[in-house]
Amino acid sequence: MRILILNWRCPSNPRAGGAEFFTHGVARRLVEQGDEVEWFSGSFPGGSDCEEVDGIRMVRGGTQWSVHFSAYRRYRKSLRERFDVVIDEINTIPFFTPIWAPIPCFVLIHQLAREVWWYESKFPLSALGYVLEPWYLKLYRRVPSFTVSDSTRKDLLQLGFSAPITVVPEGLEKAAFSKRAKSSRPTFIYVGRVSPSKRVEDVILAFQSFHHMFDTAQLWLVGDGPRAYRRKLLQLVDQIGLTSDVEFLGHLDNRDKHEKMAQAHMLLMTSVREGWGLVVSEGNAVGTPAVAYNVPGLRDSVVHEKTGLLTETSPTALASAMIRLWRDPKLYDRLVREGSRVVTNLSFDRAAELIRSELIRATGSAGSALVGTASDSNRWTAE
């Protein structure tokens, strides 16, 4: 098949995240099966207009705010001749392919924005985005969709999506992970974008409560984000007197990130919502269970009291769960064992198999026999 992927970011973009990591893993496997994949995304400083990465043709044009129109302008006249199917990846703003694409379209969406608008955008843009999102997503109600969590599937159903919604597993590159001895101090870690919708201040306040009882504890914050927000967090840490026990590590490459995750005792997650929360699964893979807010996405990646703990959305509740888990070695060991088992079900190969099967069904292509054929079920389970 000739496949076009539209996503406002590519894996090389400095702002690339879990969605791009997932898409890259799937696209690479589609190429390995003999498919041709072109990925159109926005430009960024230092990025070339066109290059090949793992057999994927990367094409860039436009900015965060103009990439959608750039895609329309580039492909609207030649789409049918060049591609068999298009995957419209929605990260807040879609490409509106149902309006202009004359070939089969699919949606790939990790999560709705919803409450994220209030945290990441200023008024009135936040209010406008929050109100308009359900309306423009309704353009996709009859478009087959892929997502990575049951939470997002339910969100789409509530919007009236009537076409098949295929829930596919997140992917982990297994060779990148290994377990390490835990730190000699009670050690907590946050990994992700350091931005307002992640509510990293809640992580710090929960750690403060834990630190009152166990004063040798330390907290590592891994990731980058808006300068103003990071400055706010630094000021908070200084105000509560924990500068010597809270370390801002910034962006780390995968090897160093996984090393820190393996050494920590618990991963803390306080996002407003996630598509899945891939770092939770990465933590499970290296023997570090998550204590997380019970919100969409995180309630999918964390199986409460089986692979981690879910709490109400408050620093007090998060701290209570941290203390409980620290004081209960039997529970901790059980979560580590079960978390390590469950993540073995996360597979880029399986995700690519399910996606490719649906693409073949839509295009009528015979496809390659190498990948196999997915079952009639359009769901997978982590258990």
Image: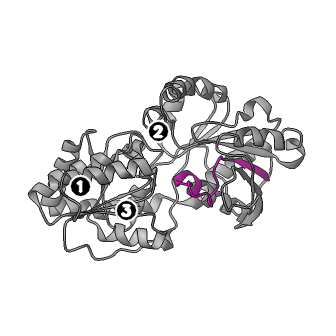
Amino acid type of the residue tagged 2 in the rendering:
Glu
- Label 1, label 3: how many angstroms apart (C-alpha)? 28 Å
Q: Position of residue 182 (x, y in %)?
A: 26, 73
Residue under the point 57% across and 60% down: 348
Residue under the point 51% across and 36% down: 112
Q: Which residue is mark 2?
A: 120
**Picture quarter containing residue 25?**
bottom right
Q: Which residue is mark 1?
A: 238
**Disc 3 or 2, which lies upstream in sequence?**
2
Nearer the camera: disc 1 or disc 3: 1
- Label 3, label 2: how many angstroms apart (C-alpha)? 26 Å
**Disc 1 or 3, which lies upstream in sequence?**
1
Q: Magenta part of the protein: which range?
A: 1-21
Amino acid type of the residue tagged 3 in the rendering:
Gly
Q: Which class describes the residues within 10 Å of circle 1: few (<14), some (14-19), or many (20+)? A: few
Give the left or right position of residue 126, taking residue 3 as reference: left
The count of marks equals 3
- Asked if residue 2 lies in the magenta stretch, the reply is yes
Q: Which residue is mark 3?
A: 283
Q: Is residue 182 above or below residue 340?
A: below
Nearer the observer, 108 or 188: 188
